[in-house]
Image: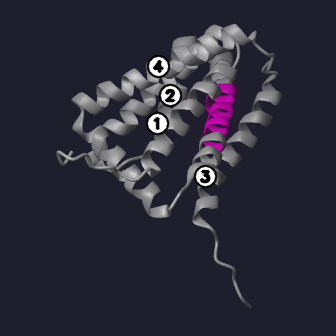
């Protein structure tokens, strides 16, 4: 019996697909409304969340060296897999859609149903961070991820929709994946 070699790149999409399916079904079970937002509110909310996440990322990059260590590790893995722009698009889409449907669409809605809102926000952020483990040298990454979970939960609650969180998460992941897979170009002064 011959086994075909599994494409590791495709395996990277599996967690997002599974979380998305569970999140979607859980959201339906809870009766979460997936009503469309007006485009101007969707864009404003998504861009506000995106820039908040980008600010957190820049802050952590500058002041918490362990966060930069985690970023370097992830960048090395992505480059080692030989990802291209199409893979960056696909992985950013599956991870952002899946994670937002699960963490903000399902877990946050479930938490709000049984807990005070502030505790539901913190609980889903803690679970979100737990799904993004890092070695001890990169302790800043799960902390950053928890804060991102809080930002995305707040935008979801403020808008009454998970759409802005999905879009913000997608934009951030896509831009960072593309940056990670691009070869480093050195300038004439060696930097």
Residue interval drawn in magenta: 94-107
Residue beneath the point at 78% across and 24% down: 30
Frontmost residue, 139 versus 72: 72
Mark 3, Cα crowd under 10 Å, few <14 / some 14-19 / many 20+, is some
Q: Nearer the viewer, mark 2 or mark 3?
A: 3
- Label 2 secondary element: helix
Q: Is residue 183 visible?
A: yes
Q: Is residue 31 above or below residue 132?
A: above
Determine whether label 4 and label 2 are within 8 Å by CB: no
Residue at 45% across, 24% down: 53
Q: How is the image coloured?
A: one colour
Q: Please tell me which of labels 4 and 2 falls first in the chain.
A: 4
Residue at image location 22% in from the left, 28% down from the top: 63
Q: Between disc 1 and disc 3, whose residue precedes?
A: 3
Query: Percent x, y for residue 151?
Result: 50, 19
The reply, left or right, for residue 2 in relation to residue 189 is right
Marks 3/4: CA distance?
24 Å
For the residues labelled 4 and 1, the Cα–Cα distance comes to 20 Å
Q: Which residue is mark 4?
A: 51
- Give the distance between the C-alpha atoms of the residues marked 4 and 2, in whole angstroms: 18 Å
Q: Is residue 122 visible?
A: no
User: In whole angstroms, how far apart are the C-alphas of marks 1 and 3?
Assistant: 24 Å
Residue at numbered disc 3: 87
- Observer-side mark, 1 or 3, equals 3
Residue 8 in percent (x, y) is at 58, 65
> How far is mark 1 from mark 2, CA to CA?
6 Å
Disc 1 is placed on an element classified as helix
Q: Which residue is mark 1?
A: 129
State yes or no: discs 4 and 1 in contact (Cβ < 8 Å): no
The residue beneath circle 2 is 125
Which of 53/151 is in front? 53
């Amino acid at each position: 019996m011959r086994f075909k070699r599994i494409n590791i790149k495709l395996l990277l999409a599996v967690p997002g697909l599974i979380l998305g399916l569970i999140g979607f079904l859980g959201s339906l079970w809870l009766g979460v409304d997936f009503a469309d937002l007006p485009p101007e509110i969707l864009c404003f909310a998504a861009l506000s969340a995106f820039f908040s996440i980008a600010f957190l990322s820049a802050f952590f990059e500058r002041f918490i060296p362990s966060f930069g260590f985690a970023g370097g590790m992830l960048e090395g893995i992505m480059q080692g897999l030989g990802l291209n722009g199409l893979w960056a698009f696909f992985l950013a889409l599956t991870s952002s859609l899946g994670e937002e449907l699960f963490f903000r669409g399902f877990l946050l809605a479930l938490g709000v149903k049984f807990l005070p809102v502030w505790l539901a926000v913190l609980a889903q952020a803690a679970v979100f961070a737990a799904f993004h483990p890092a070695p001890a040298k990169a302790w800043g990454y799960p902390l950053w991820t928890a804060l991102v979970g809080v930002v995305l939960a707040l935008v979801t609650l403020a808008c009454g929709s998970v759409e802005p969180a999905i879009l913000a998460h997608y934009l951030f992941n896509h831009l960072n994946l593309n940056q990670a897979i691009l070869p480093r170009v050195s300038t004439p002064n060696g930097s």
